[in-house]
Image (spheres, grey):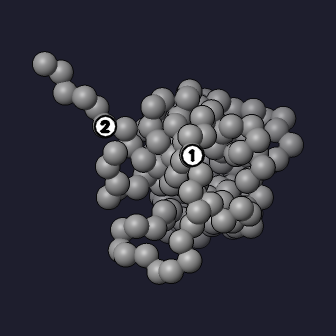
Amino acid sequence: MSKAVEPNIWGIHAGKTGDADSQFLKKHCIALGWTKLGNLAAIPADREALKPLIAQAYPEKKPGAIPVDAGILFRFVHEMKQGDLVAYPSKLDRQIHLGRVEGDYRHEPKTEDGYPNIRPVKWLKAVAKRTQSREPGQSVSSAGADSGPDRAAFTRCRRCRV
């Protein structure tokens, strides 16, 4: 008898001001910027390989942020799988959109939104955000949340199970 694999649940933010919100919801995807790095699938599947590329492309980055950013990119390209779930708290409509990853990573350099690193998503449901404070572990958090103007931030929710 084979053990069923539980999907991961990932949290993603649409940039500091929610500027990728339209792309996420209208184009049925989640996306990261990092335009100066090009096609992330062309980089070896190794977090260490990402670090010098990030440092070179983004010289303003603090040295301590580079390993965090490398982890974010690695997870988006190599750890996220079809069937995983996504939680996206929209700043524009004040809802948390829940979706399922529908395909592999792809790079679309001509996207007008500035977020060319994409995962297709089927949005399943949207629920209103609560205005009262949350219990610990209930919020959708992100490593490096909203850490730059040209990228969405994202992480796996470690306390969540389906």
Q: Amino acid at mark 1?
A: Lys
Q: Position of residue 103 (x, y in %)?
A: 56, 27
Chain-order first, disc 2 or disc 1:
2
Say which residue appears at 35% left-offset and 74% top-offset: 136
Q: Secondary structure at mark 1?
A: strand
Q: Amino acid at mark 2?
A: Glu
In the image, 127 versus 159, the foreground residue is 127
Q: Secondary structure at mark 2?
A: loop
Residue 125 disc label: 1
The span from disc 2 to disc 1 (Cα, nearest Å) is 19 Å
Residue 19 visible in the snapshot: yes
Q: Position of residue 51 (x, y in %)?
A: 53, 51
Residue 6 disc label: 2
Say which residue appears at 73% left-offset and 53% top-offset: 21
Say which residue appears at 40% left-offset and 55% top-offset: 157
Residue 61 visible in the snapshot: no
